[in-house]
Image (tube, helix red, strand yellow):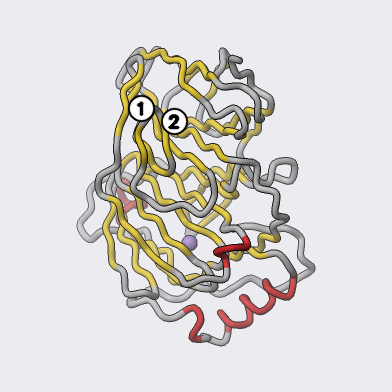
Amino acid sequence: MRAQIDERHTSRTVELGGATVRRLLPRRDRRTVGAWCFLDHFGPTTREEAAALAIGPHPHIGLHTVTWLVEGELEHRDSLGSRQRIIPGQLNLMTAGDGISHAELAVPDTTSVLHGAQLWVAQPEATRHGPPAFAHHAELPTVAHGGWTATVILGAWGGAESPASTDTPIVGAALTTDGPASAVVTLRPGWEHAVAVLAGRAEVAGEPLAPGEVVVIGAGPDELELRTEEPVHLLVLGGEPFDEELLMWWNLVARTPEEIRAGAEDWAAGAERFGTVDTEVARVPAPALGPFARRQG
Ligand code: MN
């Protein structure tokens, strides 16, 4: 069955470290797509903004962060001692488990703008209390279809499989083209999928899609038509519907207010759990613990 668009959502604008980002997930009416629970589309920044980027150490629990660039370069540092530059086509995959902290910094002397996506994948109960980890994948498999090139970020797509490890049945692929392209790609019918365009304009399941919007296709269809007349960089995210109820607050993904409170207090106290990041950039303080409106940031 050929996919149709079931939902279309417009991003919210969020200020983050002096930059404006488009927040596409989560939304009150769409918390997750598979285990994907957060999607920020940032940039393209100016060159000056890219050179000044300094998101100081901040904590995470219960999630994987996926950093994906369209343009530019970033340096990741975390409390495990990782220091890793990333460029377009590569994957930085950080696992928070019970606690990690990290910083995202400009690469010295960078002359590029910065453009990309920051995504989170919720960890399931089985792994979310586990140890933190960080992996950099410099080489990801690609698949060609109908003028599109798909880079497999997580999971399997078009017969190729990402080397990155996953905790839940999930897929993430970036489809790019330098010009007109048209393909019918295969979806797993039991999974739900989202498509977001990071650059250019495409036609997804026959409907136009531009940056600042995300469309969702519920479980059922096994084919999706993707077409464009111009250069495009888009993300397809999918997975088995995630049935655990998440409580997301700031940078913490948990299940209960007590867990969130403990995370915020441990961060404020400089607890061992979150370690330290080797940088001069100041730690980001947690916002005040109010009633647990489901805030994310
Ligand atoms: Mn982070």
Query: Relative to 279, is 7 on the left or the right?
Result: right
The quarter of the rendered structure image containing the N terminus is top right
Instruction: Give the Cα separation between the discs numbered 1 and 2.
Output: 6 Å
The one of 103 and 33 positioned closer to us in this rendering: 33
Q: Residue 39: horizontal and vertical position, in percent?
A: 54, 46
Q: Amino acid at mark 2?
A: Leu
Residue furthest out toward the right: 291
Residue at 47 percent across and 56 percent down: it is: 65
Q: Which residue is under mark 2?
A: 234
Q: Is residue 287 above or below residue 43?
A: below
Residue at 39 percent across and 25 percent down: it is: 232
Q: Are marks 1 and 2 in contact (CB under 8 Å)?
A: yes
Q: Is residue 286 above or below residue 204?
A: below
Q: Residue 226: horizontal and vertical position, in percent?
A: 47, 18
What crowding class fits label 2: few (fewer than 14 Cα within 10 Å), some (14-19), or many (20 or more)? Answer: many
The one of 86 and 280 positioned closer to us in this rendering: 86
